[in-house]
Amino acid sequence: MTRLDLSTPLGLTLALLPEIVLSAWALVVLLVVSWRHRSAEDSRLAGWLSFAGVAVSAAALAALWVNGVTSDGLAQMVALDPFRYGVAAVALLSAGATILLSLGYLERERLLAPEYYPLVLLATAGMMFLGGAEDLIVLFLGLELMSVSVYVLAGFNRANAFSAEAALKYFLIGAFASGFLLYGIALVYGATGTTNLSLGGAQLAGKPLGLMASLGLGLLLIGFGFKVAAVPFHMWAPDVYDGSPTPVTGFMATGVKAAAFAALVRVLMETFPAAASTWQPIVAGLAIASMVLGNLVALTQRSIKRLLAYSSIAHAGYLLAAVWPGTPVGAGAVLLYLVAYSLTTLAAFGLLAWLGRNGERDVTLNDIAGLAATRPGIAFGLTVCMLSLLGFPGTFGFIGKWYIISALVAEGQYALPVIVVLTSVVSAGYYLPIVMAMYMRPAPSADRYSAVRLAPTAAGAIAVAVAAVLLFGVWPAGVLDLAGQSGRTLTQTGVPIAGP
Amino acid sequence: MAAFVFYLFAAAAVLGAAMCVLQRNPVASAMWLMSTMFSLAAIFILLGAELIGILQVLVYVGAILVVFLFVIMLLNVARTSSDLRGPASLGATVVVAGLLVVELAALWQYTPRRLAADIAQAPAFADPARVFAAGAAARQATAAQGVVGALAAPLFQTYLVPFEVTSVLLLAAIIGAVVLAKRNI
Amino acid sequence: MPENTFLGPSLALSAILFSLGVAGVLLRRNAIVLFMCVELMLNAVNLAFIALAQFHGAGGQIMVLFVMTVAAAEAAVGLAIILAIFRHTQSVDLQNINLLRG
Amino acid sequence: MTSFLDSIGYGRWILHVLLLLPVVGVVPVLLGREAWAKWTALVVTLAEFVLSVGLWWSLIPGLGDMQLVTNAVWIREWGIAYRVGIDGISMVMVLLTTSLMPLSVLASWRYITSRERGFYALMLTLLTGLLGVFIALDMFLFYVFFEVMLIPMYFIIGVWGGTNRLYAAIKFFIYTMAGSLLMLVAIVALVWRVRAVTGQMSFSYSYLLEHASAAGAAAPWLFAAFALAFAIKVPIFPFHTWLPDAHVEAPTAGSVLLASVMLKIGTYGFLRFAVPFFPQVALSPAVSRLMVALAVIGIIYGALVALVQPDFKKLVAYSSVSHLGFVMLGIWGMTLQSVQGALMVMISHGFSTGALFLLIGMLYERRHTRLIADYGGLARVVPVFSLILTLVALSSIGLPGLNGFVGEFLVLLGSFAAYPWATGIATTGVIFAAAYLLWAIQRLIYNRLDDRENEHLRDLSFRELAVLVPLVVGIVWLGLYPRPVLTRMEPASRKFVEAVMPGSTPAATLGATAAIPGSGR
Amino acid sequence: MHLTHMVWLAVALPVAGFLVNGALALWRPQAKTAVSVVGAGVLLAAFVVALGVFAGLSNDPSQAPVIVRLWSWLPVGRLKVDFAFQVDQLAAVMLLIVTGVSSLIHLFSIGYMREDPGYARYFSYLNLFVVFMLVLVLGSNFPVLFIGWEGVGLCSYLLIGFWFSDKVNADAGKKAFIMNRIGDFGFLVATFFIWRAFGNLDFAYVSEHAATTLAPGGAVVTAITLFLFLGCTGKSAQIPLYTWLPDAMAGPTPVSALIHAATMVTAGVYLVARTNVLFAMAPVSSAVVAGIGAVTALFAATIGLRQYDIKKVLAYSTVSQLGYMFLGAGTGAYASGIFHLATHAFFKALLFLGSGNVIHAMHQAYHATHSHEDAQDMRNMGGLRQYTPVTFWLMLIATLAIAGIPPFAGFFSKDEILAAAFARGADAPVYYVFYGMGVLAALLTAFYMARLMAMTFFGENRTGERERAHLHEAPWIMTGPLVVLGVLSVIGGAINLPPFIGGHAALEHWLEPVLEPGLRFSHLAMPTGSAEYVLVGAAVAIGVIGLWLGFRVTLGRSIPVARAAPPDRGFARVLSRKYYVDELYDALVVRPLVWLSRVVLWRGVDQRVVDGAAVNGAAVVSRLAGGGLRLLQTGQVGVYVVLFLVGAVWILRAVMR
């Protein structure tokens, strides 16, 4: 347990070390690529450099986490608690995996602009600010940093009209949604006199929510609803996920979502714990709508990428269900589910990126028929991913879902868990056909996928992710403890500032 | 007097915004938006945010809107036929935006006293003078250090972290804009 | 405490301008104009910040500074994206931009 | 025997070895040559069987409690542990599973011709899953096993199944999962409610059982969730329609395990979990009446629908619906006799129906059709086959002296006191059972040998006899001398009955002539 | 070691025979000599054991039943069902009848089935049948009795369908089994009632405690006995479950003699006698038993009038005679029922085996000329007296016995039953009606038996010119057992000679220890003196008149051969088609049930409602809903924004409340 005084420059620097390392590293990479940005080798160099940056940042993060660093007194601007570290870890995990997956992918798709990697790093820094923000201003800026970078990444395949369209849609609706979020920040600021989350919470505690605070809460929920792709703010997600380069899709589905959820949980639990009765029905409504719509529409998809996009909407629903309790257990559940979902989704999109060629938009169920015969390893990996997304015991996804159910039931909430499981059953209706196609249907031609080689980096990353999904599925005690402890830190701290 | 000025600029802002939305020529829209921004700058100054009012003109009108106009011209989309959507959309817009404005404009009822009552821990303590001590302190700081100084101190002390984040944000935006817009990378 | 804070009227004006921006986003098909309407929404929020900053100190005003920065950054990236899409479709009309659907 | 087992510390390691050995066996199956896969699987399953036999002597006679219990921390903070143990009931189910497994492997010897490694690896995984369900004493562990075994079965049906296998596999999977996920919610809810009362979080079966009254007002809902999961697994009408599809499309070994073991998990679940956790709900008049009614409907309905099936495998599948109805009736009959009878039906259904599926499989290997109409007059061509088929069918019909009768008789006898009308109607099931099986037998092995293709069928080979003879021996043995099995299960059954109906020793439910409706006194 | 404890040997011997013959049937079907020796040998040995048991029992002064416990079968809590045999007077009688008649029929079969390719299989089935029949009569409790009860049904099924290649035979076997199963349902329910009432299923316990446990005439005992009797109607082919028995003639003739005349079908009577105390306590049930018996006796006799298949006549005759036995049992004259059971076993076995000889001769003749005429149709016979004289004389004895002509065996037993029914009429006048029906049935019996004899043995031979030369008497192995049965048919009445001709009613006294509990409840005052003589005289007169009429009517006109026979018309047609009962059952039960199962339950409920509407319907609805929601995803940003704003408006509404 180390305490850092955030009012001193040293303390602040140490507290923000992972973010600082990452941002600075992005600059370094940028410097390097400004001399070398022509060939595939240059791109690869930038990739490995960036990966090293992620690793160093992760080391800094680990140093903070292992030492149990907390803030001395009120945390200004950024939080110093395990929840932030956990979210940052998910973001770094997502970034690292995305970089590894991209190494081969960018070469194959001839996307050789090495600026890709600094953008990933900057987006990750944005995620870490967003997920760790203790102040609405930092939250907003982190969100924008992340968003701006990801807008660009979505449109990174400039030769591809789909990619450009994805970027445009994401950007337009994203900016639009930012307006709502910002309006919410303004009203919360007006209603509390502060942008600090804990202080605001202290201010709002113990009395009914005023009109301004209520509207602020509502507008914040709208803004977050967009970022996490909750129904009915989800409409951009399938198109954007579909059109973006696949590793970026994986990045969006995991890192972006994780950071946004972390911020949502933090805002709700630190600033609005007293208003639970106001936001719980809304969160429940969003969760139910997301679970139902995401799963139902996913049933009708033929393209696997688009199917996974809708499935990610459904998973946003599950995560929102985990947000509902607003308890430490719920926060832990969100965190754990994010880890489980991120690992699985990254592996799944990685495999998908490998399967697709020349713009993998069109990988359909028919394309992977009989895959198990020619590429058993890929088929096995994708099967594990599908089962984990389905929430099947023995996989990490199950542990996550079980934790969510636990968190809900602990608060006496039964309707949401029932909907969670029922919609999970629906989801079997589209996850299983993927498994089925690979194992139980004959291949259209024997050499459909025999020639393609998976880049070793991507293969390694996927293998590690799949192994982790299985390992944590069977031996979840460690991550469960970690998530539980992180969740417990998210209780209201701080003192009222205004009024005697 | 102040009220007259406020409402005058408010009316101008609304008119500009409405025309911006309704004008079919993008260039005209941009011009109307510009007028709204000017009006808002005036209102900012009226509300005691002189520096922001000036920056509003400098940054928004001088930089951002110019970029807009530049792109409109570059793409030569000004002469396209109206891009207003059809009547169905109009109906939906009226309904949805109407509901939205009704919900949000409920804030008009806020007076300082009511705001103080919202914030104070108990109604008995809802004295604006005490609740809004921070505002008063800021005004004193402005009086003592000038409009720039009063903002500069907190910007580089309290808000150092967000300030640094904006620098990274701008970096990212630059990289992004270059990557997307440059013909050959 | 200044005599006239225009708190209620400012918030109302902010709401109206915000809604007008929203209406613009709904009504227009031109991506650039759409984006201008988003800028209008941000401006409306700025007004709210300024109005509230009268009571809570410099934070609100500084927030507006950041918003302006963000708007500039968004403008840079957004207009670059619009340029990129224009290269593909020779149009910025959103009605023509619907390759991705279903 | 007992002292020998003690000397090798059998009780300490046997359950873990049983669970682990098949999983370990998967490795050589997958890594070895394709042709070795079945041999490896056979060796592993036989070893498993031989090892499990010792369980017969390792239980303390007369003790109804869980024995050979292990309790190793798994997820400490949530009170989840690797808890395993057996009582008489689970011991018998374990033995049923381990004894059928080598037979299923042998039955697949020639049936499975493609991707053999995968098949046998899945079979071994399935074995672990099945055994795990029967010996798990931790609700989390139980749930994991309960679901995990879906996967191997899903693949077995989907990869090696018949023409409509994809539909059958996904239907089987989704149907089962729908129920079990709701049960998961109920398990978690029960745990939290118990925690709210006792302050301790634990997924331990015995702990939850002790404090299950904490469920309070939620008990009906929790029971409903448990019951739904198990009802689908059993399956009880109207949740049964996955069964015919799955049975028909599955390869022989799959059908055998599905019918003989997996269906029992549903009834086992009722006996072990659903009813003991929530006895007030389960035995409330409304629920009892519903369950008994569904059981009786299942008995009659399954039999009637079986009557008109053109596909012999489907016929047997529907007959399972009928038989499992007896089990449900027996459980809700809630006397020592009926519960013991229900357990006996579970065992003998495992033998009889397993044997029937094996026989169909053997026929299918020869003629590649399961339609009854394609056969006829087989008794002339394949007398040994016909003899065994007849014997097994008679056991399924419930001919006294064979195993089927023992369970059915005890179920009906025991349930009659509580539900005379329902039991009376259920008893008509014996008529329909005779009708559908004898009719099918007649069309298969009697009548004229019309089809020239049937003229040169081979009779059973040595391997096939090796598969069937143990079952036939079991059928006759259990029919004439079920006592050893009955006495081993009795303490656990007695504990069950006395636990859920406190104060009602079996004696109290008897001799109550005055309670008979319309008694002429 | 008491001799009675050797009783298990009587069962074990046929078990061994079954196993050996079964093994031979599978692997060495040609070893016919071995099969014969084993098959018949074990039965003869069993008969010897039975004699020993009988001797042992008669030397036992205590007269208490001996329970031989073999092993504990179904021990569950208080339920303690042992696999045990109960040797008492009733069981001993049945043991003798079963092993005795079986031995004879096994011997007969050696000749009759000699040429059949399924010889070994046949003997293994027959041995197995004896096993189950013995378990039935010896079982000491209801479940063990039920093993035999169902087991004999199984063997009946196997033997009726012995020539299974013919669909009709296989159908007949199946029908027998299923109809028996309907009866078994009754038996089972009765067992459950008994368990609930007594908490014990041993016969001895039930007999001893019935009086204290149950209320006489109460609902429980009535229900028990009615359900038991339902079992009996199935096994003993009484209305309404009799239709399987005539069809059962599809089996080999010795099987008809053994199973469907002498032993298995009488199991119902045995069961009533075994549980006599319960029936005695339930007058309503007893009346039902007697009534069904009387109606069946008369009804079946009428059908017998118009049958042409020699075995069918005998089959309906069996049904009719079984009706008599139930009339006796229902009247309370259990001993008389058993008595008639015994005499009927002798003369009906004789009749069947005799008909077997006839069929054998006919079959040989047709076989020799490769003719495809019906060897069992009496219209193809006629004048066989000269070709098969031994058979003729023996069958004549049996005919006189069944017609109730003194001093043959049937006279005494039938007369006792009728007298008892008449006597019971004093308490319950309905028994007079039963008595009348019994008398009428006796008339018809004599008539159709005379018709049978006349058509078969008298008049001109109609077999055919070429075939006539091949008609021969059967070999000694077949006629030998007939002679023994003939002797028994003549003197069988001696076992229970009534007092009025100086007898001691030996059987009745012998059975007294078993029947005593029942008699305590329903004492029967048998008619004595002049009333008795009048009844006897009337019975004899009826028999004589019936025989005379039968010969007269049959021989009075020419009989066309089966091929050329015109179809029956009018009531004769109704009779020859057996009152259309089979068709009725088919139309009312079988077809509706199959229709219900196939169309309503399977195609309707299972495939349409549960699977179609509910299960697949859920999938389809999900998919359709998904497809509908998917339509929102137009790719148009405008639509996305509208939806976004709908959500926004909703959320703001919700927070403001």
Image (cartoon, coloured by chain):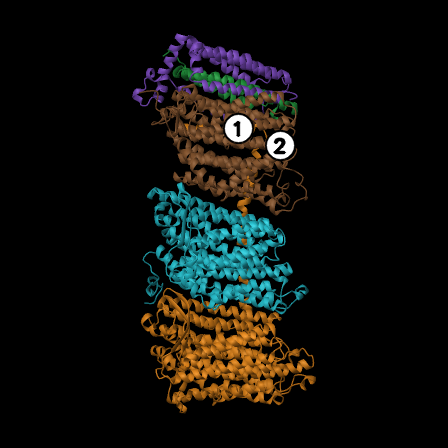
Chain colours: A brown, B purple, C green, D cyan, E orange
Q: Which quadrant of the rendered structure holds the N terminus of chain A? A: top left
**Element type where label 1 sits in the image:** helix
Of badges 2 and 1, the one in the foreground is 1
Picture layout, residue E241 above or below residue A41 = below
Residue to which mark 1 is pinned: A54
The residue nearer to you, when weighing E10 against E553, is: E10
Q: Looking at the image, tell me whether mark 2 or mark 1 is earlier in sequence order.
A: 1
Q: Is there one chain holding both mark 2 and mark 1?
A: yes
Packing grade of label 2 (10 A; few <14, some 14-19, many >=20) is many
Picture layout, residue B7 above or below residue E360 = above
Picture layout, residue C37 above or below residue D293 = above
Q: Indicate the position of residue E323 as horizontal and vertical percent values.
A: 47, 77
- Residue farthest front in this picture: D7
Q: Indicate the position of residue A12 as horizontal and vertical percent values.
A: 43, 21
Q: Indicate the position of residue A237 as horizontal and vertical percent values.
A: 55, 31
Residue to which mark 2 is pinned: A105
Q: Mark yes or no: residue B115 visible.
A: yes
Q: Indicate the position of residue E479 as horizontal and vertical percent values.
A: 57, 86
Q: Mark yes or no: residue E441 visible.
A: no
- The image quarter containing residue E451 is bottom right
Cα separation between marks 2 and 1:
19 Å
- The image quarter containing residue D296 is bottom left
Residue E217 in the figure: left or right of residue A121:
left
